[in-house]
């Protein structure tokens, strides 16, 4: 089957999840063309070879907070410059190929192609949790306006897919039909890992003085990624050791960690949950999806959500590590089997409907009288 696969390039979560899904579909014998932007384009090009680069939106950040208006104006300006050419190149690439199914991981142009050509669309991501599930007042909290904006943007990015496969480690009630919740799609390295409980915390954060002060004197070794570069990498500051950026090094630290301190990004939270690692989640301000993830994480008993982090927040997390480990020991997930089976079923069903429609069109064409 011919599958067009679009991948959002903001952050790495879309890319690493899509890599697992694409490899599974390739192993099943499907023919795939991948369209991606930003970081996803660079990552998937290295993993898969040929990937078509397309335009994608990005967030404007300042002091760890998403700047809404700057994000809108930056994206609109970039879209005016890049989108027309990107769309022309993209459409030319797939025009003659005629995919039978489109799959998207929160990538809007593939959705536009699906609607324009009436090709079945399957959406595989985590962020549609915002739009297609029901969230109570405790999860939404005082950030109701952020929630409304996030829901509107999420719905607009990929509307009207035939099926939505949403990856999640929490289970809110569904709000809309044609939606299936599946366990998180994690990297093969995470599936293969044998987690142990070491002495250190692993910290992945852009940081700030309050977090640095809290970690410096917390009494537990902290392997910190993302807070320092240059000459400070490899140095120590009290309990803190600033580690160099490294995929393998980070993975080893994660697998052997006592706990995790990070933002509210779904990919790292889901990997930590899979490995049984408690998390102190500090979501980015103005990013409701991260706040939602962190609040559900706390509700499930897998860690804490802290919108501001200081010494008492870190100590409160450390004091409850045994409790969180006990709860996480009851979490069950058999690799990516359930998620991959669900995606395969959605794609195969969509492809079957395409073939029937095309066969019907050919039959109608043969019956059309000619002059």
Image (cartoon, rainbow, N blue to C red):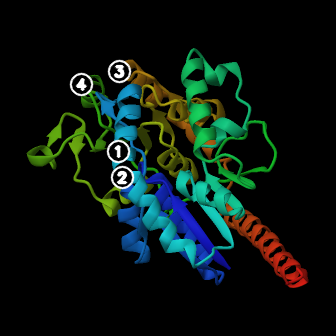
Rendered-image quadrant of the N terminus: bottom right
Q: Nearer the viewer, mark 3 or mark 4?
A: 4
The relative height of residue 231 versus residue 362 in the rendered view (above or below) is above
Q: Which residue is mark 3?
A: 310
Q: CA distance from mark 4 to mark 2?
A: 38 Å
Q: Which residue is mark 4?
A: 209
**Residue at position x 51%, y 46% from top?**
277
**Secondary structure of residue under mark 4:** helix
Q: Which residue is mark 2?
A: 82
**Residue at position x 65%, y 55% from top?**
123
Estimate the x, y position of residue 356 in percent, counting from the top left.
84, 75
Label 1 Cα neighbours within 10 Å, binned few <14 / some 14-19 / many ≥20:
some
**Secondary structure of residue under mark 3:** loop
Q: How many marks?
A: 4
Q: CA distance from mark 1 to mark 4?
A: 33 Å
N-terminal of the pair, mark 2 or mark 3, is: 2
Q: Is residue 111 visible?
A: yes
Label 4 Cα neighbours within 10 Å, binned few <14 / some 14-19 / many ≥20:
few
N-terminal of the pair, mark 1 or mark 4, is: 1
Rendered-image quadrant of the C terminus: bottom right
Estimate the x, y position of residue 19 in percent, counting from the top left.
51, 67
Give yes or no for contact between labels 1 and 2 (Cβ–Cβ under 8 Å). yes
Q: CA distance from mark 2 to mark 3?
A: 42 Å
N-terminal of the pair, mark 3 or mark 4, is: 4
The relative height of residue 243 versus residue 316 in the rendered view (above or below) is below
């Amino acid at each position: 089957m011919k599958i067009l696969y679009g991948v959002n390039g903001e952050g790495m979560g879309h890319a690493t999840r899509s890599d697992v899904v694409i490899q599974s579909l390739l192993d099943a014998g499907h023919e795939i063309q991948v369209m991606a932007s930003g970081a996803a384009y660079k990552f998937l090009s290295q993993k898969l070879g040929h990937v078509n680069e397309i335009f994608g939106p990005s967030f404007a950040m300042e002091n760890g907070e998403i700047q809404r208006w700057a994000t809108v104006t930056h994206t609109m300006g970039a879209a005016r410059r890049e989108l027309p050419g990107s769309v022309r190149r993209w459409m030319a690439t797939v025009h003659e190929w005629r995919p039978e199914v489109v799959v998207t991981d929160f990538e809007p142009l593939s959705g536009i192609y699906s609607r324009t050509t009436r090709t079945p669309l399957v959406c595989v991501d985590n962020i549609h949790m915002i739009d297609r599930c029901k969230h109570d007042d405790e999860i939404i909290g005082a950030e109701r306006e952020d929630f409304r904006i996030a829901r509107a943007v999420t719905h607009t990015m990929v509307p009207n897919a035939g099926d939505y496969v949403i990856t999640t480690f929490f289970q809110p009630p569904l709000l809309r039909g044609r939606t299936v919740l599946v366990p998180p799609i994690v990297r093969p390295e995470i599936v293969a890992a044998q987690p142990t409980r070491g002495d250190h915390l692993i910290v992945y954060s852009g940081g700030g003085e309050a977090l640095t002060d809290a970690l410096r004197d917390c009494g537990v070794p902290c392997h910190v990624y993302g807070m320092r570069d240059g000459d400070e990498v490899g140095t120590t500051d009290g309990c803190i050791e600033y580690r160099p950026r490294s995929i393998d090094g980070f993975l080893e630290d994660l697998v052997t960690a006592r706990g995790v301190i990070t933002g509210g990004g779904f990919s790292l939270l889901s990997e930590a949950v899979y490995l049984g690692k408690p998390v102190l989640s500090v979501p980015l301000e103005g990013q409701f999806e991260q706040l939602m993830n962190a609040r559900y994480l706390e509700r499930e008993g897998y860690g804490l959500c802290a919108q501001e982090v200081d010494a008492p927040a870190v100590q409160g997390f450390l004091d409850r590590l045994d409790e969180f480990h006990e709860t996480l020991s009851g979490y069950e997930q058999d690799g990516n089997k359930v998620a991959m089976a669900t995606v395969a079923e959605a794609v195969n069903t969509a492809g079957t409907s395409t073939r029937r429609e095309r066969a019907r069109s050919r039959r109608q064409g043969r019956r059309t009288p000619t002059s």
